[in-house]
Image (cartoon, helix red, strand yellow):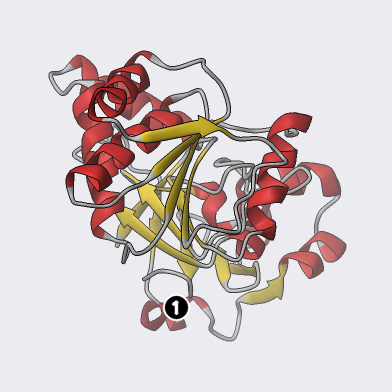
Amino acid sequence: MENVISVKNMRESDAFTINTGTSGKELMKRAAQGVYENVRWKGSIAVICGSGNNGGDGYALAEILFDNGYSPRILKLSDKLSEDGAYYYNRCKEKGVNESFCDEYTDLSEYDIIADCILGTGFSGELREDILSVIENINRSPAYKVSVDINSGLSGANGLALPTAVKSDLTVSIGYYKTGMFLNDASHYIGSLKNVDIGIKLLKKQFYLIDKDELSPFTGYSSVILSDDDFELKYALDEAQFRRNPLKTVSKESCDSKKIFVVDYGGSKLIADQTYIYFQSDRIV
């Protein structure tokens, strides 16, 4: 079984890995290499970069693409850069990788592949208007879309998209799967999902991803199997709290009733069996 972790655990595990000898730049390079190896790159490629470390993953990816004979174009949302992101941006600049700014009016129709590197798993809440307009522009494009780590606009904690997120053909998760990739709105935005291991030392195990053929022990006679909407109607005393924190809500109901709950989010399942929480998804490749 693979691990599924919280955003907090991911952030702390990432920091621990850096503090014990693996630099942030090295992790960023490994992340970009993992994305590069899991996509069939072709034609005209745009790498759309935000201002944080997710944007840094994009700059590192653009360098790898360039070094492998492709001609990617970096589309920046901002001149602001994280420290590690600036390192890879400057390397791209030195090598002559094409770049320009991106906004809601940027013509994305010419690209065969778009790499979404705007917002990472730490994002939550509502999108700023300028970023929202760029995401809507990306979603209008006919290009094959790859989201790096998570779909920009989707919360890595609970899978909420307020009001939207990049709709990807493939999402390449970095390090470990995060809980929000299987909850709430995630199934509407993630096409296929793949995780790449970049050597992050996990501080604590939390939840687990099971295969479809491991699901049957959880779906016996006494199990409660229902959609997220039905759970909300029948069991959620506070519907908003259920959406914000489905793990806590479903786990409590499982413990109180002493039953296994299987909540279906349109192809991804949240499973609580009084002791552990599991996830299962048809989108894993």
The local secondary structure at tag 1 comes to loop
Q: Is residue 59 left or right of residue 117?
A: left
Q: Is residue 186 left or right of residue 13?
A: right
Identify the residue shown where x is 37% and y is 74%.
211
**What type is the residue that disc 1 sits on?**
Leu
Q: Is residue 124 left or right of residue 82?
A: right
Q: Is residue 27 above or below residue 239?
A: above
Q: Is residue 135 left or right of residue 119?
A: right
Q: Nearer the viewer, residue 39 or 175?
A: 39
Q: Specify the quadrant that holds the N terminus.
A: bottom left
Q: Nearer the viewer, residue 33 or 70?
A: 70
Identify the residue shown where x is 60% and y is 66%.
142
Pinpoint residue 116: horizontal percent, then vertical percent.
Answer: 50, 46
- Give the image quarter of residue 23: top left
Q: Nearer the viewer, residue 75 or 176?
A: 75
Q: Which residue is mark 1?
A: 215
